[in-house]
Amino acid sequence: MVTPLDELLAKMVEVGASDLHLKVGSPPVVRIAGDLHPTKLPALLPDDTITYAESIFTPKASATFRATSEANFAYGRREFGRFRVNVFRQRGSVGVVMRRVLHELPTFEELGLPPALGHLRTAKSGLVIVAGPASSGKTTTIASMLDHINRTRAVNIMTFEDPIEVVHTDQMAIVSQREIGMDTETYATALENVLRQDPDVILIDRMKDAATVRAVLSAAEMGRLVFACMSTVDAVETVTRILDFFPEHLQKPIRSQLAGQMLAVVCQRLLERADGQGMVPAVEYLQRSEDLSEVIVRAKRPSRLVEIMEQPGSNMQTYDQSIAGLYTSGLISYETAAAALVDGDVLRRIPEADARLSEPAKVEPTIPEPVPMTSVADEQDREPEYEPEPVVEPEPIPEPVPMTSVADEQDQEPESEPEPVAEPESEPEPVAEQESEPEPVAEPEPEPVAEQEPVAPAPDLSTLPPPPAFTGVGITSFD
């Protein structure tokens, strides 16, 4: 016999699970601290999941499911609280996922949210956007803000949700919660009339079209404090997505409204704690400033928003800065931080990183400097105007002709030690013309040699026939 649903929910609350999965072919599965754990109950049959769904369907949810094969609604019992429910079809069978909604809302400090966000709960007007992927804690963060306002301010709070997850009872404030499809037809219809209901604080749990954005900005301009949710990843994508709801020729007035009314963009994602005791939020926080307004109004590059958040003393932070702070405080492990960072080099700039590693960090091998092709002396002797190719020394000549040794001496760099031969009196232009020749004595010019001071007695060159081409070996005279 199938286990009653209320019994499963009671057990789920007892073990501290956040989600319950009911799927044909598998036993009930619960999620605890981010990980899925199957129960030891029998695998569910197709009729079992249908029975579970029909036992909690509202009339509206039942009709929606028959029409679309999807249904979202809330289910609650006094004994163990409320749950957000999604019923769907998969491979022809019915699946059910139920998420627990906390009855006692945690404070900012208990949630681990930055203290800099605290002033948002006391603001009188403006737009606060809370963004993040699915299951990132957006609902809990906004519910915590509304709970603080409910306990500390005498105001009228109006919420528009699909479905209602967290129930707020009147405390110092009065709270009216309207569910889309049950209490009002659409978000647009509800927002058209909200200002006639004398609200001070408004919550929109889903801002996903141009009509909703217009209504939200108009309410903020009328002096109301508006909280809105978006399923964007970070602050840059959030601002870009809002503007992309409108065609380019309509963006100019929207940019002006957004720059003037947006108090903050709070983006978050949940990371596993180092001690395994649940999750902790990493928070990216962009708040109103002159630089932010300029970027939005003048349509500057979106990446400029990251630079604004990273400015020292800005009271803002990027995801990477938040993750680095969680790591240095020991709340998350090195592996978790490294996997979540956008810039992987952030951890390398943290002095305390090595002391917290469970394993030694991988050290990049030191690559030696490449050996230069020439020696240091060659580099110093090299003329700045050109880089001569290295001259290959010819084979030793048994009895070198003076012309040959003099040409060799002329090819030497000025700084090297010269051979004990007198410096030629003539100008060096003829020798300079031989720079590109690999064998400068191949076709010697007779004039420079005639003007050289002879090292040894030589015959009168004018009476001799022209010398043969120099081959480099076996030549001892010109006879």
Image (spheres, rainbow, N blue to C red):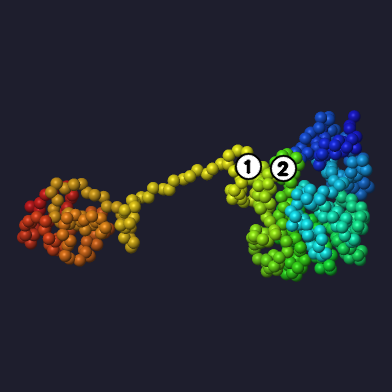
Q: What element carries label 1?
A: helix
Q: How many labels does the image show?
A: 2
Identify the image quadrant of the N terminus. top right
Write down the residue under mark 1: 356
Q: In this view, does 408 lie to the left or right of 266?
A: left
Question: Nearest the camera: 181 or 407?
Answer: 407
Picture coordinates of residue 183 (x, y %)? 92, 55
Residue at the (68%, 51%) spot, across then down: 322
Q: Is residue 82 left or right of residue 341?
A: right
* Front disc: 1 or 2: 1
Question: Is residue 177 something that shows in the picture?
Answer: yes
For label 1, count other residues whose C-alpha is less than 10 Å away and answer few (under 14), some (14-19) or many (20+): some
Q: Distance between the Cα atoms at labels 1 and 2?
A: 14 Å
Write down the residue under mark 2: 273
Vertical position of residue 210 compared to residue 19: above or below: below
Identify the mark nearer the N-term, 1 or 2: 2
Vertical position of residue 115 compared to residue 425: above or below: above
Q: Are marks 1 and 2 in contact (CB under 8 Å)?
A: no
Question: Is residue 442 something that shows in the picture?
Answer: no
Kind of residue at disc 2: Arg
Question: Nearest the camera: 474 or 341?
Answer: 341
Q: In this view, does 381 lie to the left or right of 140?
A: left
For label 2, count other residues whose C-alpha is less than 10 Å away and answer few (under 14), some (14-19) or many (20+): some
Picture coordinates of residue 237 (x, y %)? 70, 57
Question: Nearest the camera: 55 or 9?
Answer: 9
Picture coordinates of residue 246 (x, y %)? 75, 64
Kind of residue at disc 1: Arg
Picture coordinates of residue 346 (x, y %)? 61, 50
Residue at the (30%, 57%) spot, across then down: 381
Q: What element carries label 2?
A: loop
Residue at the (23%, 55%) spot, across then down: 417
Vertical position of residue 436 compared to residue 111: above or below: below
